[in-house]
Amino acid sequence: MVSADAPLKEPGYNKAYISLLSDFTTLNEPVIDATPALGEAVTIGSNHTWAVGKGPIEVLVDNRTLEVTGQTTGTYGSLRMNYAPKIFIKGDGPKVLEMINNLLNEELVLFVQDGCGNAQFLQFGCDCSPAVVEKGAFASGTLKGSNAKGYELTLDAMCKYFYNGTITKR
């Protein structure tokens, strides 16, 4: 059993990072040139800055249960995408439970590696529209053929970006 705050040692798991919106001193947005290239409006190339002593919470997520759905919301002329990233945070114990309880009613930004072997992260949530936990569940025992224990969180996020900056851990 690997707890959520352990070093990554198991295949099939990636690191993800969850930050409280209030922990940022600078949460960058995409910088769009006068003649923007396709994709520029959803790519963040500069580093975010966390307050002194703050930083993202590093967790292990199960690649087999990592899921992001998106659907349009609004009416014609003002449609936009609404995303629901679902992550399974592996682990159980006092620290993990307290972390989950502390995240449930907070404004968040989620960073998940895109799984393509590079340093790019998918970022869900932004300064003007942070991600929030929509629902959560605890699973113990068999999860898709494993003996994983952990917490499944589904977030609600209106912002999705490709973050190419650095993640500075606590």
Image: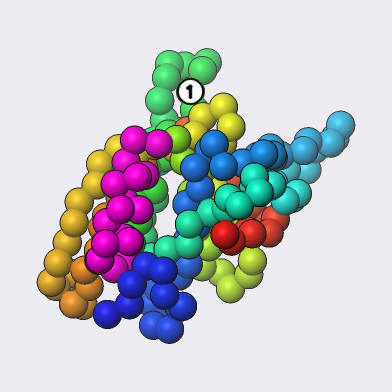
Q: Which residue is label 1 attached to?
A: 79
Question: Tag count in the figure?
Answer: 1
Q: Badge 1, how many Cα within 10 Å: few under 14, some, many 20+?
A: few
Q: In the depicted view, which residue is nearer to us: 78 or 137?
A: 137
Q: In the depicted view, which residue is nearer to us: 61 or 100?
A: 100
User: Does the stretch in magenta take in 146?
Assistant: no
Instruction: Determine the image quadrant of residue 9.
Output: bottom left
Q: In the depicted view, which residue is nearer to us: 35 or 48?
A: 48
Q: Which percent across, then down, holds residue 7?
A: 46, 78
Q: Is residue 139 left or right of residue 111?
A: left
Image point (18%, 77%), residue name? 147
User: Residue at the left extreme?
Assistant: 141
Q: Is residue 64 visible from the viewing direction of this image?
A: no
Q: How is the image coloured?
A: rainbow
Relative height, residue 12 to residue 51 (above, below): below
The span picked out in magenta is: 90-106
Image point (73%, 43%), residue name? 40
Q: Is residue 95 left or right of residue 169?
A: left
Question: Residue type at mark 1?
Answer: Leu
Q: Which percent across, then down, holds residue 75?
A: 43, 16
Q: Which percent across, then down, holds residue 6?
A: 41, 75
